[in-house]
Image: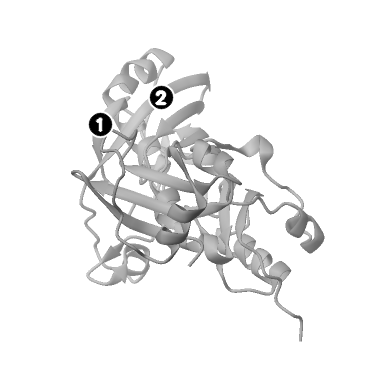
Amino acid sequence: MTKPIEVAGLLLLNKPAGLTSFTSLNRVKRAFSTGKVGHTGTLDKFAQGLLVALLGRAVKLTPWFSGCDKWYEGIIRLGLETDTLDPEGAPVAAAELPTREQLEAALPAFRGDILQEPPVYSALHIDGKRASALARSGETVSMRKRPVSIYALELLEYEPPLAHIRVHCSSGTYIRSLARDIALAAASRGHLVSLTRTAIAGFCLSDALVDDEPASLQAAIRPIDTRVFAALKIPVLTVNDETARNMTQGKRLEGFNANLNGDTLAVFRQDNSFVGIIERTSDTWRYGYMWSV
């Protein structure tokens, strides 16, 4: 039996189109002979781009990764909507192609804080069951709208019927839904035919690993260091060895300045080794996660 490789850190993966996120993560699990592999947001099978995988003890840091902003580039096929809102679905509606002026005029309504209806074919749960499973069984599924934020939305190119867009958005945003809604607002119908995730927080696709051979994966592990928290925009607090020891023993958090920048802090020793995360509610600090315990 292969001896598990003790790892703790993160991997930046470049998932190809046509491969599920779980297949990509399973290859990571096999490379390290471990089941302790988490993700910070999957990609649909037809999509490609950045996946951030967390390994070993770093899996418990998932909550601080999962709410990060994301950047995408996608191509909308105008004039035709599919049931899945992607190229794998069946056509359900057709309409005339919009002009570029109509598309440009539709975009401002989707910038900022909006309410978005997620796709029926999604992993979201309704009464304990996946919406996609209910839809495939023939049930009529009603998806409740939910708030998301679109920080930037650009039309990069339009060669009918294809519109190339760039999006910077909050976690939880469905670009498939955005494609559908933009098309409808432009008096047409549409679905997403390709999607590339180019960044998550400060982690970029250009730094991601394409080769998923075990040796390459093992060599690409990134440690949990101050650069990780800079990418997450979480301030770093450096403490002396005594304070670090008290924190790893779970002693009460006292003596921290209420004016410290941020309500979430990544704590490091003076030798730059990671201690854990602390969080503030009002003027009271509590433990979020202790790495060294």
Picture coordinates of residue 238, whole percent (x, y): 48, 42
Q: Is 49 placed left or right of 282 in the picture?
A: right
Q: Nearer the viewer, residue 64 or 98?
A: 64
Instruction: Name the N-terminal-most of marks 2 and 1.
Output: 1
Observer able to see residue 186: yes
Q: Is 119 placed left or right of 235 in the picture?
A: left
Of the two numbered discs 2 and 1 in the rendering, the one whose residue sits closer to the viewer = 1
Q: Nearer the viewer, residue 33 or 277?
A: 277
The amino acid type found where label 1 is placed reads Asp
Confirm or deny contact between disc 2 and disc 1 (CB under 8 A).
no
Q: Residue at x 24, y 54 (%)?
A: 143
Judging by the rendered image, the residue that carries numbered circle 1 is 113
Q: Residue at x 40, y 24 (%)?
A: 152
Judging by the rendered image, the residue that carries numbered circle 2 is 153
Location of residue 190 by image quarter: top left
In the displayed image of the protein, which residue is found farthest to the top? 101
Q: Nearer the viewer, residue 212 or 46?
A: 212
